[in-house]
Image: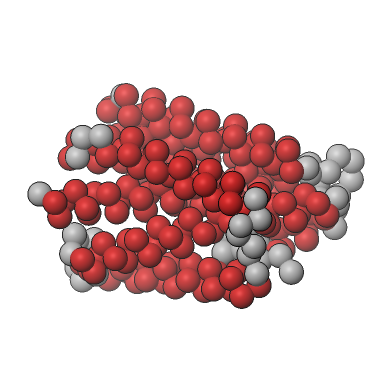
Amino acid sequence: MLRTANPALNNNSFKTAAATVSGEVMTLSGAVNKTMISTLITMAAGYWSYSNPWLGKFYLPCIIGALVVALIISFKRSWAPLLTPVYAIAEGVALGTLSLVADTMYPGIAFQAISLTFGVLFALLFAYQSGWIKPSENFKLGIVAATGGIFVVYLLSFILGLFGMPLNFLHDSSPLSIGISIIVVVIAALNLVLDFDFIENAAQSGNVPKYMEWYAAFGLLVTLVWLYVEILRLLMKLNERSR
């Protein structure tokens, strides 16, 4: 059974596509190439935004735009080849602005976060390909449950924040907050393993249409962006505490 905590890469995503497959099919190398292209687009947009502070005024529109595009891709998967680059650009501009703000507060922190994010990505990819990590069904269930729990807590924090009652222990630099951030970073990283496994199994099935390579790239990019943001937040908390 294919299972992943990533809302984009769920079992129905590839099952529905497989029911309508015709022509070329999804391959693992194709999904890897599309993921690399999407990541490079995100990084280029991020660098552009970071180097041009005036783009900061587009931060909120890009966040909203990325969410809207993500929802469209989730429901219209055949549009992924067109909209995944759009999502990558929107996320890149938003992340560039966020990184600039973080770097202004703590010089060099954005580069550290980027380095750690890709370090985790390649380390887990190597471990997965080497067979050191074998995602069992219980492992997958645990990560899915943990990711769902994080989403519920974050949603609750957002709702309470609207009423002036934020969950400060999620945002301050206390030992509890840092510990929670470490746990969230670990869960986000382990989601990459589930994504690797899910994409590989889908590609090996041989009955998934070609456009799903872009959809797979979109799903993996969602996890990668989440991991970067959580690592950046953790580093900011550690820097704040060390002052």
- In the rendered image, the vertical position of residue 215 relative to residue 174, given as above or below: above
Q: Nearer the viewer, residue 44 or 240?
A: 240
Horizontally, residue 131 falls left or right of residue 113, namely: right
- Residue extending farthest to the right is 23
The colour style of the image is secondary structure
Q: Residue at x 74, y 43 (%)?
A: 28
Q: Is residue 223 visible?
A: yes
Q: Residue, x 59% and y 46% (percent of image)?
A: 126
Image point 32% across, 24% down: which residue?
A: 51
| Rendered position, 113 above or below 241 | above
**Residue 88 appears at what percent x and percent y?**
52, 38
Relative to the observer, which residue lies in front, 105 or 156? 105
The answer to whether residue 137 is above or below residue 212 is below
Residue 71 shows in this picture? no
Above or below 146: residue 210: above
Please report the residue visible at 40 percent of the width from the left and 43 percent of the height from the top: 116
Report which quarter residue 45 is drawn in: top left
Where, by quadrant of the figure, is residue 137 drawn? bottom right
Outermost residue on the left side: it is 243
Position of 133 with respect to 199 (left or right) is left
